[in-house]
């Protein structure tokens, strides 16, 4: 194939291919997990060779901030924000890390939607780096969404009586919040 892909792009179905590295299956459809070159071997295993190396400064146990770029159940793709390293801001480029639905809460979570949404800013810990992918975890009380936006009108959501409320349109939403949620209103 040799085709270039971006995260989330549909590569085919489970009837056509077997899920290989940096590819994930969701309801029979296979999507790319990262930016890179698509290849299919003789056994019909489809995989993506990442073109972006894992950012050098990122390692397991590190606390990072990032913006949710896309959601394909059961994962969200999160763009890491620049890291502060020795007083200098180091950009992570367009690297997308992975937040899996099993790393949202200590309890079972069925769906990512309602816990995080596209555009939200999250505080997460890097749980592991595996097969060229950075995996995030937001289960701790001090981890989760730190900034959320209304899914109807994109205005910031304020926390009122433990519910997120949009002052603009009155929409009420839920998230897996970080205890330091930034737009707190009493
Ligand atoms: Zn709104």
Image (cartoon, rainbow, N blue to C red):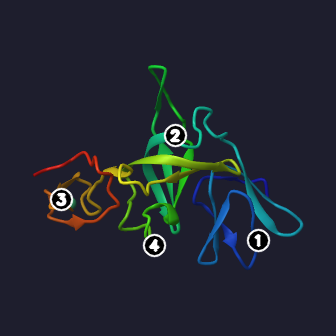
Please, what secondary structure does the residue beneath circle 4 have? loop
N-terminal of the two: label 4 or label 3?
4
N-terminal of the two: label 3 or label 2?
2
Answer few, some or many: residues within 10 Å of disc 1's Cα (few below 14, many 20 plus, some between 14 and 19): some
Q: Is residue 125 left or right of residue 116?
A: right
Picture quadrant of ligand 1? bottom left
Q: Are marks 4 and 3 in contact (CB under 8 Å)?
A: no
Answer few, some or many: residues within 10 Å of disc 2's Cα (few below 14, many 20 plus, some between 14 and 19): few
Label 1: which residue? 18
N-terminal of the two: label 1 or label 3?
1
Label 4: which residue? 108
Q: CA distance from mark 3 to mark 2?
A: 32 Å
Between 104 and 112, the one lying in front of the other is: 104
Please, what secondary structure does the residue beneath circle 2 have? loop
Q: CA distance from mark 1 to mark 4?
A: 28 Å
Q: CA distance from mark 4 to mark 3?
A: 27 Å
Label 2: which residue? 62
Answer few, some or many: residues within 10 Å of disc 3's Cα (few below 14, many 20 plus, some between 14 and 19): many
Label 3: which residue? 166
Residue at 45 percent across and 72 percent down: it is: 108
Residue reaching furthest left?
A: 186
Where residue 176 sits, quadrant-wise, is: bottom left
N-terminal of the two: label 4 or label 2?
2
Residue 151 circle label: none
């Amino acid at each position: 194939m040799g085709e270039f892909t971006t995260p989330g792009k549909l590569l085919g179905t489970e009837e056509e291919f077997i899920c290989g590295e940096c590819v994930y299956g969701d309801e029979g459809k296979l999507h790319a997990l990262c930016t890179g070159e698509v290849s299919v071997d003789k056994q019909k295993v489809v995989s993506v060779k990442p073109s972006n190396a894992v950012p050098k400064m990122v390692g397991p146990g590190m606390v990072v901030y990032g913006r949710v770029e896309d959601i394909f159940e059961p994962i969200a793709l999160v763009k890491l924000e620049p890291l502060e390293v020795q007083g200098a801001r180091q950009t992570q480029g367009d690297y997308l890390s992975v937040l899996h639905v099993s790393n949202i809460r200590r309890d079972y979570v069925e769906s990512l939607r309602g816990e995080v949404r596209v555009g939200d800013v999250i505080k997460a810990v890097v749980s592991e780096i595996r097969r060229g992918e950075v995996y995030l975890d937001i289960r701790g009380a001090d981890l989760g969404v730190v900034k959320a936006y209304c899914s109807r009108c994109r205005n910031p959501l304020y926390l009122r009586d433990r519910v997120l409320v949009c002052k603009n349109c009155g929409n009420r939403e839920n998230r897996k919040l970080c205890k330091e949620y930034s737009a707190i209103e009493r």
